[in-house]
Image: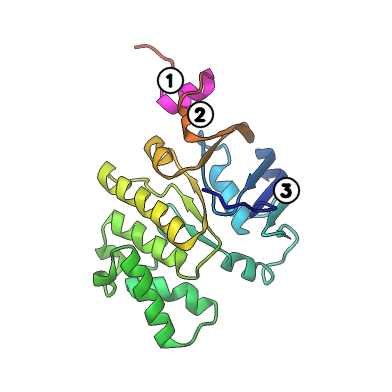
Amino acid sequence: MPKDSPSPLIELRNVQKHIGAQQILRGLDLSILHGESLGIIGGSGTGKSVTLKLIMGLMSVTSGSIKVDGVEITTLNERQLGPHRRKIGMLFQDGALFDSLSLEENVAFPLREAGERDHRKIAAAVQEVLEDVGLADHKEKLPPALSGGMRKRAALARAVITKPQCILYDEPTAGLDPIVSDSIDHLIRRTQRRYGCTAVFVTHDMKSLRTVADRVVYLRDGVIYFSGTPAELFTSTDPVIHQFVTGESGETS
């Protein structure tokens, strides 16, 4: 659960984002607490993944404010965003591993990019996180030789190796079978507790919300339509929320 804190780790205020003629976010206000595990849900095209990329600094806002650990990031240039991005790890939907690098080299990559040159420190850090995700015996393999679940675990190891304050997850269980999905959910929860980091994850997996989330926000029409605990989400009598959670289209055959 979130630790007591005088201010949120991440604050989005009146964030608007246009992509071409399409308005994705229409004044998003969102505070994310230190140590919180936040699930973001919503229909396709409602701005879930865009929100993660804005927090990471991979996309720029059209207007509005984003503060991470008290620092306004919307005014930072690419060079200034470097220290910010080291505070945040990101697990992309496809893992985004380098196919030509071994698992060990993939996981070490963020440390090398951050300027670490001590080979022994790098090797020790890689061994630690690979043990955490159960892949220590596979470090010489290339990503194409890994299963979908193993690639997700490898991507998580790479995301946590710099000990970030926050980890962003874009559909962490997408494309996985239910048993592997459950193992990834529990791994995310264990990782959050072990490292004391904030977790923000986009998902369509309702089971993941029950396992991983402290709080859920539901995006609709570019703003937050609902914010509450998973229990409050699943017991809501709001017809819009009920339809989304149950996956019922309302059509008859």
Label 1 residue SS: loop
Mark 1 and mark 2 in contact (Cβ < 8 Å)?
no
Mark closer to the observer (2, 3): 2
Of callouts 2 and 3, the N-terminal one: 3
Q: Does the magenta stretch include residue 244?
A: yes
Label 3 residue SS: loop
Label 2 residue SS: helix
The amino acid sitting under disc 2 is Glu
CA gap, disc 2 and disc 1: 21 Å
Q: State the image coordinates of residue 112 (x, y, percent, origin top left).
A: 49, 79
Relative depth, front residue between 26 and 68? 68
Looking at the image, residue 124 lies above or below residue 178 = below
CA gap, disc 2 and disc 3: 32 Å
Residue at the spot of label 3: 62
Residue extent of the magenta highlight? 238-249
Residue at the spot of label 1: 249
Q: Is residue 70 magenta?
A: no
The amino acid sitting under disc 1 is Ser
Of callouts 1 and 3, the N-terminal one: 3
Looking at the image, residue 200 lies above or below residue 158 = above
Residue 82 is at least partly visible in this image: yes
The amino acid sitting under disc 3 is Thr
Relative depth, front residue between 150 and 70? 70
Residue at the (41%, 25%) spot, across then down: 246
Residue at the spot of label 2: 232
Q: State the image coordinates of residue 107 (x, y, percent, origin top left).
A: 40, 71
**Is residue 38 shown left or right of residue 123?**
right
Looking at the image, residue 69 lies above or below residue 229 = below
Question: Which label sits on residue 43?
Answer: none
CA gap, disc 1 and disc 3: 33 Å
Q: Which image quadrant: the C terminus?
A: top left
